[in-house]
Amino acid sequence: MKAAQFAEYGGPEVLRLVEVTEPHAGPGQVRIAVRAAGVNGIDWKIRAGFMREIIPLSLPAGTGIDAAGVIDETGEGVTGVAVGDPVFGSGSRTYAEHAVLSSWAALPPGLSFEEAAGFPTPIETAIRIINQVGVKPGQTLLVSGASGGVGSAVIQVARERGIDVIGTAGASNQDYVRSLGAVPTTYGDGLVGRVRAIAPVDAALDIAGSGVIPQLIELTGDPARVLSIADFSAPSHGAQVSSDTLDMAGALAEAARLFTEGAFHLPVDQAFPLADAAQAQAVSQAGHVAGRVIITI
């Protein structure tokens, strides 16, 4: 089968389309014929070698975590789904014609494979970090880097819980952030003043890792009320870091429920064929995406 793979760490150009042996579902897993794969920041960070000490790989290696498609093989002990069922979920080496998922949920009616492929990592991350930072209904949450996949998911989950959201994004994505239910503002110099002019902030999430932890602490007045998923220097300021997946299966079920209720969407900003996986990761790495970057199979 065809899959995107890299034989050395480096820029997007090291990602190539190659022929590999098909994977098979192990116990508690399903294999899907992939229709679409989500492109996440962690994908290009692994490819670039930034994560080699945390996630050691034997090269050449495939890439990708999130996908949607049709089950074509079930592993031992799997119940509740069958070959032919459309699902979305999380697994490994999903930039490929076939991929194995370790967590999945049934594709709700009306949800496309392309949009669903962008759900898993953002929804799990959003639920986890909102819970971890301790923001409550009626409070105000600042999201730094609000227009990408995780930021978009955070806004919608928070709003569904009755949390007010202020979201930072580039000038071209202000209307997009507003459309999700947040009050938008731009990032960069003067951030503290702009946010204070909108509302007091009870907690803050750093999605983009753009060096704003001190400003977020200034806005919340408490380092413990600031959490980053991208700036691992945050603890040196007294802030939190979150990186470990806790409940992917639960998050996928929640995404399906919220979508069915009309409370959750992650629009596809750009889609690329599998042969252009390197370009897809380059777009993701450059940032400024409104929603998700997707690879179609």
Image: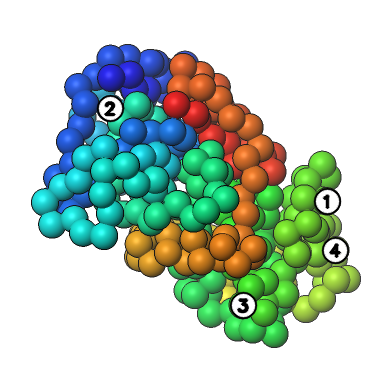
Q: Give the number of the mark in front: 1 or 2.
A: 1
Report, in whole angstroms, how far the alpha carbon at label 4 lies from the one at label 2.
Answer: 44 Å
Name the residue carrying label 3. 161
Report x, y in % for residue 177: 75, 55
Query: 231 left or right of 54?
Result: right
Where is mark 1, residue-wise? 175
The CA span between labels 2 and 3 is 39 Å
Tag 3: residue type? Arg
Q: Residue at x 64, y 84 (%)?
A: 137
Q: Is residue 246 above or below residue 37?
A: below
Amino acid on which disc 2 is placed: Ala
Label 1 sits on a secondary structure element that is helix
* Callout in the foreground (3, 4): 3
Counting residues from the start of the chain, the first of labels 2 and 3 encountered is: 2
Q: At 28% across and 54% down in the image, what residue appears?
A: 81
Mark 2: which secondary structure? strand
Question: In the picture provided, is 261 more to the left or to the right than 47?
Answer: right
* Residue occupying the point 18% across, 55% down: 78
Q: Which residue is mark 2?
A: 61
Q: Select label 1 or label 4 by which is in front.
A: 1
> Could you tell me if the residues under marks 2 and 3 are in contact, i.e. CB atoms within 8 Å?
no
